[in-house]
Amino acid sequence: MIEPRHTAFLLAAGFGRRLRPLTEARPKALMPLCGVPMLDHALALARAHGHEHVLVNAHHLWQQVAAWASLREVSLQVELPDILGTGGGLRVARDRLAERFVVVNADIASDVDLGALLAACPPGGAAMALRPLDAGARIGAVEADPDGFVVHIAGVVGEPLHDPPRTHFTGVHAMTRRALAAIPAEGEQCVVRTAYRALVPRRLVRGLPHRGAWRDIGTPAAYLQANLDALAGRLPLPVDPWTHGERRGGSWIGP
């Protein structure tokens, strides 16, 4: 049986160093957000936009991700002995991916419109979901020009359009298989510093504004706040936590 081409790629191979010690026994992608593994939220987002053929990569504590994938009809890519990075994992998966596909970081909680993102992806290029950059945020700016093409990625390519910069990359994007050719087999394995560095000067990357929900759950403080915001209704989640636990006042109690 020939495996179908996957239209969604979930990134779940990282070590979760910023979230230690929580990630010493569990991959960051499987940390529960209101009782539901973050990978389940990422998968629900993909499935809500019609992505039935989903691929997830794994490295750190990969057996746990493999067990998760086997119960959800998700294909698995184990990256051993070395972690391959955001670009290297995509390069290795190239023959398993559709001509156009979306990439979702499992440690990002968002309601990015994956359909619109995929539609914005130009032939041979990519599209990045961009959101307003908070004042004082320690994250690199990524900016699109008035025509919607990304022209600046801080520290990588292009010059700033605004002072201060106005938007940043959400970690959710869409790409074409052809765009993966810019990722080398050895050396730098970051998709931004390889593929996007090559594509941006050729005006092959669209920037799609995202003003909805978004949260990077990378540190213990951010992880705690994401749970509190979800319970308070400030962070909409693809999987409703109240259907997976018991409500007692303003608290959520899981199994």
Image (cartoon, rainbow, N blue to C red):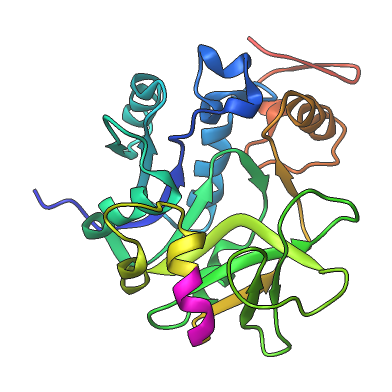
Q: Position of residue 52 (x, y in %)?
A: 38, 51
Q: Residue furthest left?
A: 1
Q: Is residue 100 magenta?
A: no
Relative to residue 102, is residue 126 depicted above or below?
below
| Res 40 seen here | yes
| Res 93 seen here | no
For this view, does 42 lie left or right of residue 96? right
Q: Position of residue 2 (x, y in %)?
A: 11, 52
Q: Quadrant of residue 35?
A: top right
Highlighted range, magenta: 197-202
Q: Position of residue 203 (x, y in %)?
A: 53, 86
For this view, does 68 lie left or right of residue 2? right
Q: Position of residue 74 (x, y in %)?
A: 34, 39
Q: How many marks?
A: 0
Q: Quadrant of the C terminus?
A: top right
Q: Nearer the viewer, residue 191 or 122?
A: 191
Q: Quadrant of residue 128?
A: bottom right
Q: Identify the residue shown where x is 8% and y is 48%.
A: 1
Q: Identify the residue shown where x is 73% and y is 23%.
A: 220
